[in-house]
Amino acid sequence: MEWNYTQPVNIRFGKGRRKEIKELSESLCAKNGLLVADPFFFTNGLVDEILEQSNGALVASFGELSPNPDVTEVDACADVIREKNIGFVVALGGGSSMDCAKAAASIALTEDSIRKYHGTGVTMPQEHLPLIAIPTTAGTGSEVTCVAVLSDHANGKKSPIVSDGFFPDYAIIDPELTYTMPPKVTAGTGIDVLSHALEGFWSKGHQPVCDACALHAADLVFKYLYRAYENPSDEEAREKMCEASLIAGLAFTLPKTTASHACSFPLTNLHHIPHGEACGLTLDYFARINAKGSEGWRIDDFAKRLGFKDTNDMADAIHELKEKLHLRNDLKDLKLSEEQIADLVRISRHPNLYNNPVDITDEMLDEMYHNMA
């Protein structure tokens, strides 16, 4: 077996470490920073707090973002970077702000629209502005990945762009920023963490370092996600879920995600199911399918190391966890037509599907979606 491992992101983990932006910008020899943040943080005072604590390192902010950032928003952010002569970018929030910031920090150094690289196969330029990522959810792991997931709502398209230029220079993981996450967000982002861990482990591109990260992250999710959901003020559970999110990000960024993420794109794009919940919806189904494949023994061993009897027992636990978190386990409320189910099958044939260790056929997808509907 041949494999490579690279993780270029400098990680800063701990309570209160969001105050280190000034110090990190100086280490990067970067000035005139732009803060890219989710819109909510412009209303709850966090943007003002971060700007003030930067001691002049941050000179502007951008918050015109939607939950699934659109290519037009990336282009608008890049325009701000060009107009204000921005020297580095700080992303504050969930995956939306980080995905937008990653793409804008690269595209701003060109005259291109991000559309040129979105789902086209055209390789992103590697030059980029320095980037500091500060997650406020325990979910996406985007602070340590080279992926930006973007939407093109005008053309009904959502897909990831992968570029080594998207790796942040620094990731600041401050668990205090997750204390105010509502239970619904805690649940959705937490099941996304589990998806990252499991899919990174069983991906065709799996390798030993990422496997170890996947096991550690999954173990934390099973132990702490429901605690964080049930009691949002449980600081230990919040910190452990931040750790799980980060480590799961390390687990999947190189192997890449698989079938559950491939299916999540049409579920989000067509039916507006939040990303994490959409990933978790099919996770137990694909766990059972993959356990029947030629590398099923690896997944069974993974499940046993987590304390389960086998993969089916782990899949049962995932299903039960989603029920306890009040996340979807079916699509019955959508009352899908045959045409809508056919669309889900067709659009699920996303490149991530081909990372899955078992070849997923249209017939398997059709059966799955019919059972859920």
Image (tube, rainbow, N blue to C red):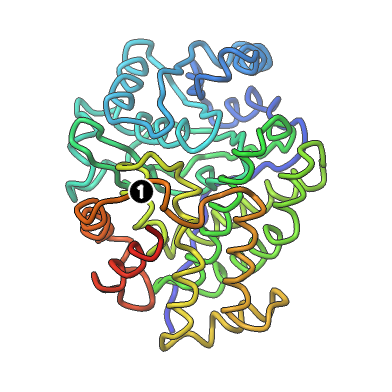
Residue at image coords 22%, 38%: 156
Give the SS element for disc 1.
helix
Which quarter of the picture shows residue 197? bottom right
Q: Please provide percent x and percent y for residue 231.
A: 79, 41
Is the residue 342 above or below the residue 102 in the image? below
Q: Is residue 81 above or below residue 282?
A: above
Nearest the viewer among 229 and 100 is: 229
Q: Position of residue 135 (x, y in %)?
A: 59, 36
Of residue 337 and residue 243, the one placed in the foreground of this image is: 337
Q: Residues within 10 Å of mark 1 (few under 14, many from 20)?
A: many
Name the residue nearer the viewer: 76 or 158. Answer: 158
Which residue is painted at 48% across and 33% down in the image?
Answer: 131
Task: Judge from the rendering whether residue 189 lies leftward or rightward of residue 283; answer left or right.
Answer: right
Q: Residue 327 placed where, x, y %?
A: 56, 49
Give residue 137's quadrant in the image.
Answer: top right
Quick one: quadrant of the C terminus?
bottom left
Residue depicted at 51% across the width and 24% down the height: 38
Q: Is residue 66 left or right of residue 299?
A: left
Q: Residue at x 44, y 50 (%)?
A: 278
Residue type for callout 1: Leu
Q: Where the N terminus falls, by quadrant? A: bottom left
Report which residue position mark 1 lands on.
267
Percent from the top left, x then y, of residue 358?
A: 36, 78
Q: Is residue 174 toward the left or the right of residue 131 in the image?
A: right
